[in-house]
Amino acid sequence: MTEQEAVPRRTARRRPRGRLKFTRRFYVLMAFLVLVTITIILVASLASGGSGGDFQDTVVSAIGISEGELNRLKVNELGAVMILEYHRIAEEGRWSRTPENFRADLEYLYEQGYRCIGLDDLVNNNIAVEPGCTPVVLTFDDADPSQFRYIEQNGDLVIDPRCAVGVMEEFDREHPDFNVTATFYVLPGLFGQEQYAEKKLTWLVENGYDIGNHTVNHPSLGELDDNAALKELAGNIKMVQEYLPGYQQTSIALPNGSEPKNPAILTYGEYDGVEVRFQASLLVGANPAPSPVDRSFDPLRLPRVQALDPSLDTGDSGIYAWIQYFMENPERRYRSDGNPATVTVPKHMIDRVDMGKLGDKELRTY
């Protein structure tokens, strides 16, 4: 509909001098502009799978938050991101957390404004968390039975509420805005309970979790020649695809943090007809990863933070030490602007931005 059709022509009326009035055409046009703006926002919300409850988030995504809010929230999308490394969920130890303490980790992260994202989203800079919140990535190594276990309850097969998946699923029901997800770096044991291996892997993928590569025999890849290293990587891919045909692993947790002598085989290699193509590889520790638009970001050498009890953290490099560090140094922490289409950084940090990593995102400074 054209403006002429929407607003018929009228003869201008004379107005007394000194008195400001607006014509009917003005009000109609203003109402039209407001309606168009609201329509655009609602369409954007629905297109992204949102609902009326997502209206405020959609507004932020469409027009961004004010500079005053950016300052108040200390937005900095060049800050560091923790990739947490878990192993067993059992008795407390250097490589183990009790179910209660794992739950406490999630609670504390949530209270401190952390929100889960997948590793792929970090690597590809598809970070969508609330304004002022910080992304965090959860990873689990070794496919230990304590990570995913089925039990019988009243004649039904259910997920053990005390295994890692059980704890996360319960937490997700209570805090859906935490966006629980994780990547499981598997070994041939596949969480024990061999009869349920396919059921577990299928359930994980269908419920928003990822499966990563951790080799077949857990060797230090740096001690192997290229062919032997590729055999380990391809063997893990083939094992997973026996249960999940066509599933593509996009990352590897390097056993013992040992990189291959030729790191190029991680991005492309082949063994016995199986292709190896990873976007990312993870080290063992012991610090947060740079922002994905930071010049120092290297997806093939991503450090992780050990998730262990503070009493066992002799090097002050575990989860609680780093959370405390970010409290004391808030300018070092990644804080989202709430808009996945933009990358917002303080003006004095702009030199650290790798413009080639922005892709189609808009750079915003304040």
Image (tube, rainbow, N blue to C red):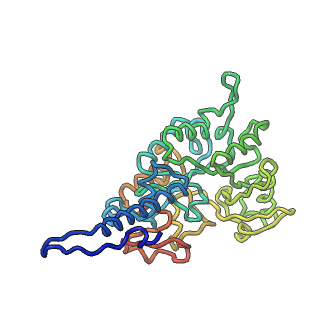
Q: Quadrant of residue 11?
A: bottom left
Q: Is residue 156 above or below residue 129?
A: above
Residue positioned 56% across, 61% down in the render: 122
| Along the line of sight, the residue nearer the viewer: 35 or 366 | 35
Residue positioned 75% across, 43% down in the render: 189
Q: Is residue 357 left or right of residue 33?
A: right
Where residue 69 appears, as percent x and y from the top left, is 33, 61
| Along the line of sight, the residue nearer the viewer: 54 or 331 | 54
Where residue 12 appears, as percent x and y from the top left, is 26, 75
Residue positioned 69% across, 26% down in the render: 156
| Residue sticking out furthest to the front | 11
Where residue 348 appears, as percent x and y from the top left, is 37, 74
Q: Quadrant of the C terminus?
A: bottom left
Residue 92 seen in this snapshot: no
Q: Is residue 340 above or below residue 137?
A: below
Residue 137 seen in this snapshot: yes
| Residue sticking out furthest to the top | 154
Q: Is residue 111 above or below residue 170?
A: below
Q: Is residue 275 left or right of residue 56?
A: right
Q: Quadrant of residue 285?
A: bottom right
Residue positioned 58% across, 55% down in the render: 118
| Along the line of sight, the residue nearer the viewer: 182 or 145 | 182
| Along the line of sight, the residue nearer the viewer: 220 or 104 | 104
Q: Is residue 174 above or below residue 178?
A: above
In this rendering, the count of numbered labels is: 0
Where residue 135 appears, as percent x and y from the top left, is 49, 56
